[in-house]
Amino acid sequence: MNSKNLGLNTICTHVGEVEDKQFKGAISPLYMSSSYAFEDVEVKRYPRYFNTPNQQALCKKIAMLEKSENALIFGSGMAAVSTTMLALLHKGDHVVLPQTLYGGTYNFVVEEFHKFGIEYSFAEGFSEADFAEKIQSNTKVIFVETPSNPLMRITDLEMIARLAKNHGLVSMIDNTFATPINQTPADYGIDIMIHSATKYMGGHSDICAGAVAASEEHIKTIWNLAKNLGGSLSDYAVWLLERSMKTMAIRVKAQNKNAKKVAKWLEKHALVNKVYYPGLKTHPEYAIAKKQMRGYTGMLSFEINESYDVQGFLRSLQMIKPSMSLAGVESTILSPAKTSHGLLSPEDRIKQNISDGLLRLSVGIEDIEDIKADLEQAFKAILKLKK
Ligand SMILES: *Cc1c(COP(=O)(O)O)cnc(C)c1O
């Protein structure tokens, strides 16, 4: 198959697959071996070396989706984030990150970096000036997350790549929320793309995995540390993830479409103060989102007027389950103030606009009328509840 200029659906379905030469089966055979005879001394296949047939098959798919030379699969998104950062940052180095970071990444930075002698600064906003003012003489990496969690703020990827280039920094993005279906950061010059594959790549809330895509040179640097830290993914989960990714493009597009409809509907709802979705014209970075995204994801947040019982709203939902993770085919919801951002002080939460009325909704692939009906019956229920 000529792999130049393939469409996203075709890459998801086919690229990288291991040919079943023996039985001509339609899908990649699963190789569970943890021991492989030497082909020659240069090729030592071993799961923790990230080079089993199934690991390599999936890496080809992810690398092509991210328009990168190569990729690595990890046992979790945090294994991918931590290994990549530690591979590129050494003692005495400094990294600039956004203030609103995925909770696990934030904890990793503030709890672990001091042990390695790595310095960091948080950019307070999303503009060029916010990031530029934090760059120091020892800065080596600039890390972004766009859209951000949970307020879906957008960072201009072209601006970040330019800033990185001008200062000789490596640029990294956590591309989990957007997915390579909606956003290709390499098109704007971002160096390293990181994913929690637990989310849209897996998409069925049954796999915990991570991925990194980058140039051959960066992947080699990350691999050198990865094999020592040992955060590889079991081949069975790798094979399941390959299966999941075959439908990623159609799933994500369906979720984009549902989320946009829910966002527009919520925006007009009497009990909703505010909706945060980059596909809405009212979003502060709508123009940047439109420039760099093909779709606006299945993630959105909205704020219920705090005079109503927000926890009662969550309890009243029948189909949409309050839960920690996101991006599955089923719609889920959570209260950031009570969960992902629960450890922040009330002052810090106010500073970050995470009110008690804020809810983050991960829109699934259910029929749009059923999603709206479940939300509407929960709104009706809190109208009756006295706080
Ligand atoms: C979930 C998530 C992670 C961490 O991934 P795990 O698979 O849970 O380790 C990192 N970044 C973002 C944006 C996430 O949503």
Image (cartoon, rainbow, N blue to C red):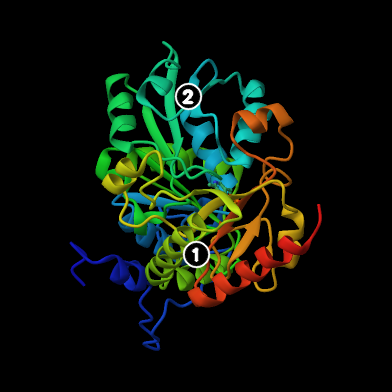
CB-based contact (under 8 Å), mark 1 and mark 2: no
Q: Position of residue 182 (x, y in %)?
A: 35, 56
**Neighbour tally class for label 1: few under 14, some 14-19, many 20 plus, Cα within 10 Å:** few
Q: Position of residue 158 (x, y in %)?
A: 28, 35
- Is 1 on the left or on the right of 341, as rendered? left
The local secondary structure at tag 2 comes to: strand
The residue shown at (42%, 16%) is: 135
- Is 315 on the left or on the right of 91, as rendered? right
The local secondary structure at tag 1 comes to: loop
Q: How far apart are marks 1 and 2 (CA)?
A: 44 Å
Q: Position of residue 181 (x, y in %)?
A: 35, 59
The residue shown at (43%, 57%) is: 297
Residue at image mark 1: 37
Q: Upstream in the sequence, badge 1 or badge 2?
A: 1
- Residue sitting at the far bottom: 23
Q: Which amino acid does label 2 sit on?
A: Val
Q: Position of residue 281 (x, y in %)?
A: 35, 48
- Residue sitting at the far right: 386
Q: Which quadrant holds residue 147? A: top left
Of residue 47 and residue 202, the one placed in the foreground of this image is 202
Q: What residue type is labelled 1?
A: Ala
Q: Which quadrant holds residue 112? A: top right
Of residue 321 and residue 276, the one placed in the foreground of this image is 276
Residue at image mark 2: 96
